[in-house]
Image (cartoon, rainbow, N blue to C red):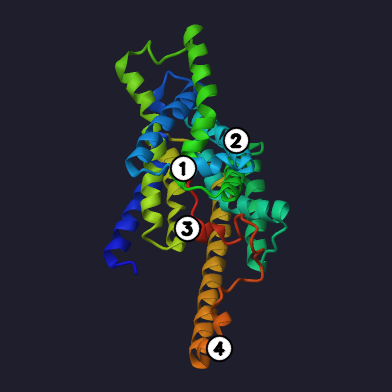
Amino acid sequence: MKTDEDQRSGLMYGFGAYGIWGLVPLYWPLLKPAGAMEVLAHRMVWSLGVVAIALACTRRWAWIRELARQPRRVGLLVLSATVITVNWGVYIWAVNSGHVVEASLGYFINPLVTILLGVVLLKERLRAAQWAAVGVGLAAVVVISIGYGQLPWISLVLAFSFGTYGLVKKKVNLGGLESLAAESTVLFLPALGFLLWLGATGGSTFTSHGAGHAAWLASAGVVTAGPLVLFGAAAIRVPLTTLGLLQYLTPVLQLALGVAYFHEAMPPERWAGFALVWVALAVLTWDALRTARRTKARAAELRAAAAREGPAAPAALAPVHEPAHRAGSGASTPDAPVRDAATPDG
């Protein structure tokens, strides 16, 4: 039974994790003049060192032997590492190229993209409210495309890469730190090789711009792993519905930074597109919360019925599943924006 103190501390950890992810656009410009590819490679290399220290402190090594005996999961980890590389690289480039607002849109529409991927790839069935949310989200993309004069490709790449990453990670079924450690291991040698080549060709900034610049680049590992530690602490203390709502803090902060700090343009048509996205997310969240309440009420009714009937009806205590979900798919369900809190890697 979680105490009020657990709930409060969990909320603080959750705000910390999503707050850091939301404010991380302030960090990437500090790494200039390093280019996006060099920053990305340093992030991969130093992340492995940070998560290795974290795992050593918590003595969480048992998963490695189990994972090594499952080639399919290893293959999925290679896939997830590849997808998150695309996500990280595009995000870093977007922030340092003046596209923070468009990047924030990617994480706003990510829950809608996750649902769309569930329908297309997993043949999941949606409720009417979920279809409505997806439809409004598509309309938002059209409106924003008209405003930009082109598809918001940064937003779409970030949303689809992170949505795919989430689906693959659910199949792998590893904790946040363990998953990051495995993915960083996959990426370490290519990233290190790239950095060595960059140094040999005179393109590296790591050793040519002073100790301060080198320290900033090395800190990318902490910026990557730190929020995951906070998120893990929050996840065991507060309901996932709460974390699912907290996840919107990240793109809200990113949008605020893009407009107020980086002074990126927000013409009326772009505000209109964002407003449609927010309407879609409101519908999605309302539907998910309503479904969760109904499921909880139904489970309570079954428990009460089982208590009245005595021990002869233990089957009544079985978990209640909404018919709209496919049991055992291992992938994000249509309620993912609220039940399965995302971890946006900025």
**Vertical side of 55 occupied by 282: above or below:** below
Contact between marks 1 and 3 (CB within 8 A): the answer is no
Q: Name the mark on residue 244.
A: 3
Point 55% across, 82% down: residue: 314
Point 38% across, 12% down: residue: 207
**Separation of disc 4 and disc 2 at Cα?**
48 Å
As helix, strand or loop, the secondary structure at mark 1 comes to helix
**Separation of disc 4 and disc 3 at Cα?**
38 Å
Q: Name the mark on residue 78.
A: 2
Where is residue 331? Give x, y as percent: 62, 54
- Quadrant of the rendered image containing residue 312: bottom right
Task: Using the image as rendered, state which of residue 152 and residue 146 is in the foreground.
Answer: 152
**Vertical side of 11 occupied by 196: above or below:** above
Q: Which residue is mark 1?
A: 178
Q: Name the mark on residue 312.
A: 4
Which one is earlier in the sequence, the residue at label 1 or at label 3?
A: 1
As helix, strand or loop, the secondary structure at mark 2 comes to helix
Contact between marks 2 and 1 (CB within 8 A): the answer is no
**Separation of disc 2 and disc 3 at Cα?**
27 Å
User: Three-letter amino acid code at disc 3?
Assistant: Gly
Q: Residue furthest top?
A: 201
214 displayed left or right of 173: left
